[in-house]
Amino acid sequence: MSNLESTTDIAPASERLTVEAPGALPARILYLLSRYPAVSHTFFLNEIRELRKRGFTVDVASINQPDRSRSAMLAVEAEEAERTFYIKSKGAVHASAVAAKTLFFRPGVFFRGLKAALSLGQWDARAATYALFYFAEALILGDWMRSHDHRHLHIHFCGPVATVGMLASMAWGFSYSLTVHGPDEFYDVEKFYLRQKIERAKFVVCISDFCRSQLMRIASPEHWDKMHVARLGVDLEVFSPVRPLSNSVGRMEILCVGRLVPSKGQLILLRACAILHAKGCPIQVRLVGDGPDRKHLEAFAKQEELPVFFEGARTHDETRQLLGEADIFALASFAEGVPVALMEAMAMEVPCVSTAIAGIPELIRDGLDGLLVPASSAEVLAAALERLVEDLQLRRSIGLAGRKRVREFYNLPENMKVLASVLRDNAPNNV
């Protein structure tokens, strides 16, 4: 079977849009996020700002404080931080005060939430302890929502942040919806209470067809119709080519952007590059991101005498500048949703190599918009990288096709029309 026949295709954004009704009432919605702003989740910021451009009033609640000080943020991020409600910001004293107030004035809310939390923990002492912490956060969230007249909550990711949102909904009686990315919750459905979260949600936004298929796998068919695909995207005016591809003088640079964690597969990438380096292939590797695997990766690079530059965590603008200097972008992930980092590289016409897992084949058609390899195979990844290093015309054709693919299917402003329509059509009127 050819690559074209074996890959998943999707309708262009222009064929998937729901027209926003002229003169529609402005919508109010509260986003619940785990950490906002965050270097690794810039798409939160982009999505929220795009919705506001479309007439939504979007407030944000975040479980955790930002991952940087205000002084280290861009102006727009600092502005967002100032207007965000941080659930953990006031500590145990505030949590106790809210719990006491709720118990005294709204005992029904308190005991509904407590019962729901204890039912999650069941007979597991550790899970029950975590559930009680989530219950405390849910009370704070619900109390703030009530005081600000919010009646619907939209949650990104299905981990602990969604547990807090679901408990708040069960206690206080408002509705919630989810944007599901995966993949972690797909691997441990019970740990993340994924079935309960999906079935209790008013509606669910999936970032890919693969994502929706995984939810259909675990949820009863009666809930399938409330699952909507709204793809992520990038702004092609921000992520545009900065230089034409040419034969590099000296080493060709392979760039990888992602947290340094096992699931991102950076060790497989370095093993593949070590194979090429041993053959005399003129390459160097640049890793953008930080995480627990950094020491292990540094030790491997030193052992193999492999030219690897560890950039650490970088801002969005800094990462874009590094993309403009890269010859090849590689992501050897074992587990993903649909990586925005790949979309950004493709938008800048940097030829990409990644793994044929999860939703990535919806973004990249092997041999057309990029090269796809099996996850875990350093040898096959090395062969794909070598093809790109040696074939300028292949790099050029894949780079051009990659940007075209993003323009047609992962264009942020266009895809935001889809999300805006889903929210308008399904979220309760919060005005």
Image (spheres, rainbow, N blue to C red):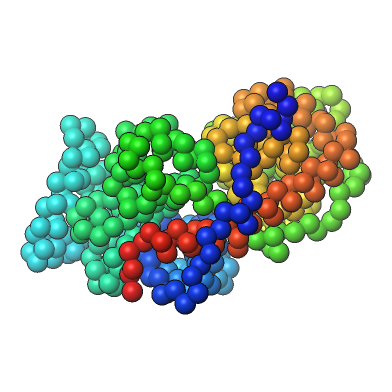
Residue 70 relative to residue 160: left or right: right
Q: Is residue 284 above or below residue 139?
A: above
Q: Quadrant of residue 176?
A: bottom left
Residue 66 relative to residue 407: left or right: left
Q: Nearer the viewer, residue 425 or 272?
A: 425
Residue 54 relative to residue 375: left or right: left
Q: Residue at x 32, y 36 (%)?
A: 220
Residue 33 in percent (x, y) is at 41, 56
Q: Residue at x 33, y 69 (%)?
A: 430
Q: Is residue 324 above or below residue 361?
A: below
Residue 71 in percent (x, y) is at 54, 69
Residue 222 in percent (x, y) is at 32, 40
For the N terminus, the quadrant is: top right
Q: Nearer the viewer, residue 420 or 356?
A: 420
Q: Residue at x 47, y 36 (%)?
A: 213
Q: Is residue 71 at least partly visible in the picture?
A: no
Residue 316 in percent (x, y) is at 63, 58
Q: Nearer the viewer, residue 192 or 36?
A: 192
Q: Residue at x 61, y 47 (%)?
A: 11
Residue 226 relative to residue 76: left or right: left
Q: Is residue 255 at least partly visible in the picture?
A: yes
For the C terminus, the quadrant is: bottom left
Q: Is residue 379 above or below residue 29?
A: above
Q: How many marks?
A: 0
Q: Residue furthest bottom?
A: 23
